[in-house]
Image (cartoon, rainbow, N blue to C red):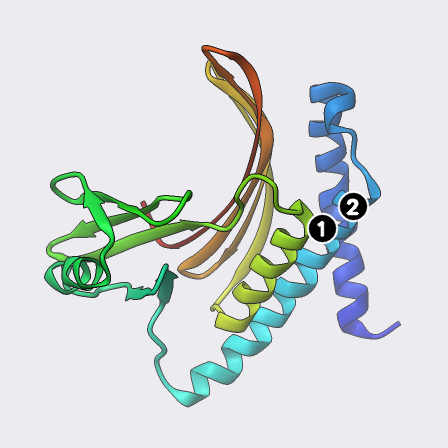
């Protein structure tokens, strides 16, 4: 078996038991399906591709860590005045004060944060209700691989809060990351399903 393929299979074997444990905690609603297995393995493959891509990019010089928010592209370290001007020129509504702002982009608002007058982090949501969840996952992972990164890790986690619960997979590649969430939230109208595929650059 080729070394890369063996590494991918070993990675899947380490992660799948943890996902199975989280699945049992949540009961039948979160049973580990073949689709989930494919998601984890696909994520490991993408993370491997990102590492190789990063090695090639490092030889070509420093690359800005950027994120497309609607029609505006922002990058880590971008001056705050330039960021806000770009959104204003594009016609997006920006709310909030201080170092944390919310940008209204369609049905999925983006979050941006600043430190010392420069962009510290930015987030965007890939999933909107009604979309095929697996299609969104594949698109987000493919986009992550195309940007590259210096190091990648895949970490499953379990979230339990008074407002809801769910299972999460974090894919971190240097200063760029993806967060996959599937769970349920407690609202005034009752319990509602939650699906999120969030991309982020920087650290909140």
- The residue that mark 2 highlights is 35
* Callout 2: SS: helix
The disc placed on residue 129 is none
Q: Position of residue 157 (x, y in %)?
A: 58, 35
Mark-to-mark CA distance, 1 and 2? 6 Å
86, above or below 191, in the image: below
Number of residue marks? 2
Task: Indicate the quadrant containing the C terminus: top left, top right, bottom left or bottom right.
Answer: top left
User: Dot 1 corresponds to which residue?
Assistant: 39
* Left or right placement of residue 195 versus residue 63 in this view: right
Give neighbour class at mark 2: few <14, some 14-19, many 20+ (Cα, 10 Å): few
Asked if residue 54 lies left or right of residue 96, the reply is right
Residue 158 vs 152, above or below: the answer is: above
Residue 187 location, x and y as percent? 47, 15
The x, y position of residue 33, in whole percent, is 81, 38
Q: Establish if 196 lies above or below 5.
A: above
Can you give x and y, in whole percent of width and height, for residue 70 in the image? Answer: 36, 59
How packed mark 1 is, by other alpha carbons closer than 10 Å (few <14, some 14-19, many 20 or more), is: some
Query: Badges 1 and 2: C-beta atoms under 8 Å apart?
Result: yes
């Amino acid at each position: 078996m080729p070394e890369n393929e063996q590494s991918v299979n070993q990675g899947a074997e380490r992660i799948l038991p943890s996902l199975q444990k989280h699945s049992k905690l949540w009961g039948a609603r979160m049973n580990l399906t073949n689709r989930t297995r494919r998601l984890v393995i696909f994520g490991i493959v993408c993370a491997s591709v990102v590492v190789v891509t990063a090695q090639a990019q490092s030889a070509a010089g420093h690359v800005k860590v950027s994120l497309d928010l609607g029609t505006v592209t922002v990058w880590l370290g971008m001056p705050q005045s330039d960021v806000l001007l770009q959104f204003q020129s594009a016609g997006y509504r920006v709310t909030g004060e201080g170092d944390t702002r919310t940008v209204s982009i369609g049905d999925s608002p983006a979050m941006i944060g600043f430190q010392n007058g420069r962009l510290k982090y930015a987030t965007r949501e890939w999933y909107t209700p009604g979309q095929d969840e697996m299609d969104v996952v594949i698109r987000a992972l493919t986009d992550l691989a195309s940007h590259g990164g210096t190091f990648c890790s895949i970490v499953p986690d379990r979230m339990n809060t008074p407002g809801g619960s769910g299972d999460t997979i974090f894919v971190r590649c240097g200063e760029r990351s993806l967060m996959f969430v599937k769970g349920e939230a407690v609202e005034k109208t009752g319990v509602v399903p939650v699906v999120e595929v969030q991309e982020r650059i920087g650290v909140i």
